[in-house]
Amino acid sequence: MGDLVIEVDVAVVGGGPGGYSAAFRCAELGLETVVVDAAKRLGGACLWEGCIPSKALLHVAALIEDAERAREVGIDFGEPRVSLDPLRKWKAERVVGRLARGLAAVAKARGVEVIGGRAVFESSRELRVEGDEPQKVRFKHAVIATGSAPTSLPGLALASDRVIDSTAALELAEVPDRLLVIGGGYIGLELGQVYAALGSSVTLAEMTDGLLPGVDRALVQPLARRCEKLFTKIRLSTKVTSLLERGSAIETRFDGDDVAVFDRVLVAVGRRPASAGLGLEMTRARADARGFIAVDDRCRTVDPAIYAVGDVTGEPMLAHRAMRQGKVAAEVIAGRPAAFDNVVVPAVVFTDPEVAWCGLTETQAAREGRTVKVAKREWAASGRALTLGRSDGLTKLVADPDTGRVLGVGIVGPGAGELIAEGALAVETALTVEDLAATIHTHPTLSETLMEAAESLLRSGS
């Protein structure tokens, strides 16, 4: 007997945020759509192994830190006691499980079938699904939304369950006494803070001379100060040269022949596109040397039948970018006028304090030789920040000196991930500094710092 053959309008490869957003929108627009996902589930790495579980654990870390800060105002809850079994169950069932059930319900309501198996292109019109029930899917259009996977350290491969990536770290198998985090980017800092709050002695090693490489230094500074208190040691401009398993520990050698021993090592040096093994050679679509699939502003590859969205299409590798691209691809497939022409894609590091930014940065403007006006509003002058006991924040505006247009916004402090939405709206809709300053902001709130930064730019120009 031959393989079962399914014929649809759209086949979406990958069930993550970009994939399910594309599938749901396609279904809304009357296109018969299936999702092919290796795990036969929606949500992808974001829901199951990344964004959602990490934010759940960061919330737990924040609760522990809040209990500690409460002593400053005369409230003492005593030393927190962490029970891993209930914590893992809450994360898995009450957070991840609930969202997963919600996505499955939406798929059912919209008539989107989820097929389990590994999808491989056999042509620009047909997929082979490898799995327990091999089948083929013939389609008019396909959307590649396979996402990304953690990057390993080149030359430092060690087959040990004591050397983990972000996926394993989120499982909370244990809270090690001594944890080494390799990588000072957002993944390393977020998970490092989680484990430090849970009781690990955390050492962080970063190859460059600062945390969050590429992010505005003024925004990173308050976070760096916080990490210096939370972590046992931060080793900047440091390279890990070898990892060796010694009994129940990992012996780590750094450049300069410095040696230290850790119970676990978390490798958090970035992510790579998951484009290998898709059978792209059977289509006109191609991945570059780094594995990224090139697309235009309508999410089309060079193969007219195949689209791609999300991490597999390049930086920034962010779920909300993937979701927007997924909707654009669906609308273009349906013949609607749509394009991924957004001016900004906001980014957030969900550490304590949070760091968020969008649009043009001061550093980028200097690199491009572009003249800008910059305003910084320290949260030490914010009434709301003081009532929260968090005066360590900063709001920063970058504007065009001639037109007054807001070109970029950066925020560091608790809730920065929520506050950056106003900054993204300002840049996306070409608001001016005067527009921000003239908009009444609720008092007392942290959002006032955007208005106050705008006001300071107007005063400097008067």
Image (cartoon, rainbow, N blue to C red):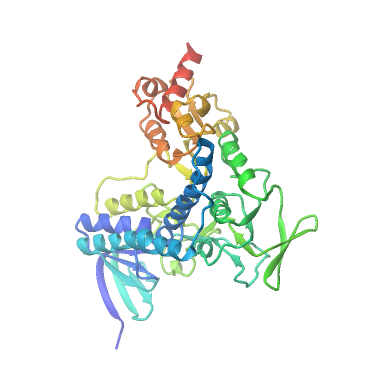
Picture quarter containing residue 452?
top left
Relative height, residue 95 to residue 392 (above, below): below
- Residue 382 appears in the picture as rendered: yes
Outermost residue on the bottom side: it is 1
In the image, taking residue 70 as reference, residue 229 lies left or right, namely right
Quadrant where the N terminus is found in the figure: bottom left
- In this rendered view, identify the residue nearer to me: 308 or 423: 423
In the image, taking residue 388 as reference, residue 370 lies left or right, namely right
- Residue 146 appears in the picture as rendered: no
Which residue lies at the image location 47% right of the left edge and 48% below the top edge? 63
Q: Position of residue 281 (x, y in %)?
A: 46, 68
Which residue lies at the image location 37% right of the left edge and 70% below the top edge? 123
Outermost residue on the right side: it is 257
In the image, taking residue 426 as reference, residue 160 lies left or right, namely right
What is the number of callouts on the image?
Answer: 0
Picture quarter containing residue 21?
bottom left
Q: Position of residue 177 (x, y in %)?
A: 63, 61
Q: Position of residue 174 (x, y in %)?
A: 55, 65
Which residue lies at the image location 39% right of the left edge and 27% below the top edge? 444
Picture quarter containing residue 309?
bottom left
Q: Position of residue 207 (x, y in %)?
A: 68, 50
Relative height, residue 131 to residue 285 (above, below): below
Outermost residue on the top side: it is 462
